[in-house]
Image: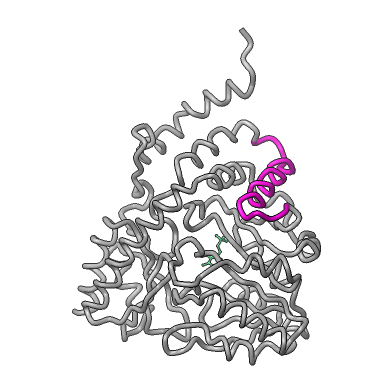
Amino acid sequence: MPQSRRAFLGTAVAGSASLIPMLQARGLEGGSWSPHFDTNGVIRLNSNENPNGPARAAVDAITRAFVDANRYTQSNDAALRAAVARRHGVKEENVLLGAGSGETLRICSEALTSSTAHLVAAAPTFEQPAAHMTRLGRETKAPPVDSMLRLDLGAMVAASPGAGLVFLCNPNNPTGSAYPLSDVLAFIQDVHRRSPNSFVLVDEAYFEYCDLAGYGTAIPAALADPRIIVARTFSKVFGLAGMRVGYGIAHADTIKRLEPWRLQNSVSALSSAAAMASCELAGHVKEQQRLNNEARAYALKTLNDAGFKALPTYTNFVMADIRRDAKAFQDACAKEGVAIGRPFPPLNTHARISIGTMDEMRRALPVITRLLTA
Ligand SMILES: Cc1ncc(COP(=O)(O)O)c(C=O)c1O
């Protein structure tokens, strides 16, 4: 009996020799997950990834999507856009898809600044927008974070007159600090009072990990004001960093302005499938939050007990004052199989440590504290 291509490929892919070891290593048959299958023994606490991997539903969706790998992605884009819009209660015209939220950040940096309209981005904050400005030969004004490692909102407002784009990373990577929504909205108002034509990009990559009282999304503000964009990602709580899916949410006029800057087909069919499956997983998010909170509390206590100040963090990483050269310390940890973050100038004596699984933290933190107290 003739077999459809979809049925044939579906069986072939699920049973392919190369996929089976990977799935077994992930423990998929038993429904449990093993996050250590591809790390060569290194505990990866350097990129703020989700150590628990993607949800099983996302992996299943990727497997099913293989059969349509010969097609370009217009219909996948449309379906994902609709799913993201549903997730946030917005219209599809309010969604800009990208290969990670990094694509949204890059598009905003490029499209909304110019040789005469600078970027405002704190020092340190997520470096991608400022790095892009350097490549374009455009100016970035970079107010340092305050002594509590929070974004200095007053200094950022003061740097905003004439800016094309003001980048507010909330919670902030790499410092882990966050502001409640009321502060964010007051900040945006202040920026617009001083600089009415500036766009404000609120990066909420760590949104789901943030348990600060009064924290909330700036999406409603973005829908109401074309000068505000919110960036989100599937890379963090959904565990899809390697699939490269993120998006911006903004007023339809702003999306229309930004859309032409997208790289066509930048979100692959497999990535779309994984992201769409993840959109439906409320339980998964809760479980990831619980796991992160538990391991994060353990990390903070261990570092503080060892005498190295680690401030409250609203993300899946902690930043500790290690009172020594961060690069040398990163190298020392790497030699012992623990990968931690690089230095983030001007905080050259702080270490950023991502939150792994509890098991990983139980193995990594004794190494870290031993090296720190040696
Ligand atoms: C604050 C922040 N924004 C954006 C990104 C980019 O993530 P992605 O392009 O994977 O969505 C990261 C990555 O670590 C990040 O920390």
Residue 102 placement (x, y as % from top left): 61, 63
Residue 215 placement (x, y as % from top left): 50, 70
| Side of 228 relative to 297 (left or right) | right
Residue 312 placement (x, y as % from top left): 37, 76
Indicate the quadrant of ligand 1 in the picture. Answer: bottom right
| Side of 325 relative to 218 (left or right) | left
Pick the front one: 145 or 290: 290
Which residue is drawn at the image coordinates 70% and 78% (left, top)?
A: 165
Residues in magenta, as a range: 69-91
Figure coloring: one colour
Quadrant in the picture for the C terminus = bottom left
Pick the front one: 38 or 350: 350
Which residue is drawn at the image coordinates 24% and 72% (left, top)?
A: 302
Task: Based on the picture, tell me whether residue 88 belongs to the magenta stretch.
Answer: yes
Which residue is drawn at the image coordinates 26% and 78% (left, top)?
A: 304
Say above or below: 216 vs 372.
above
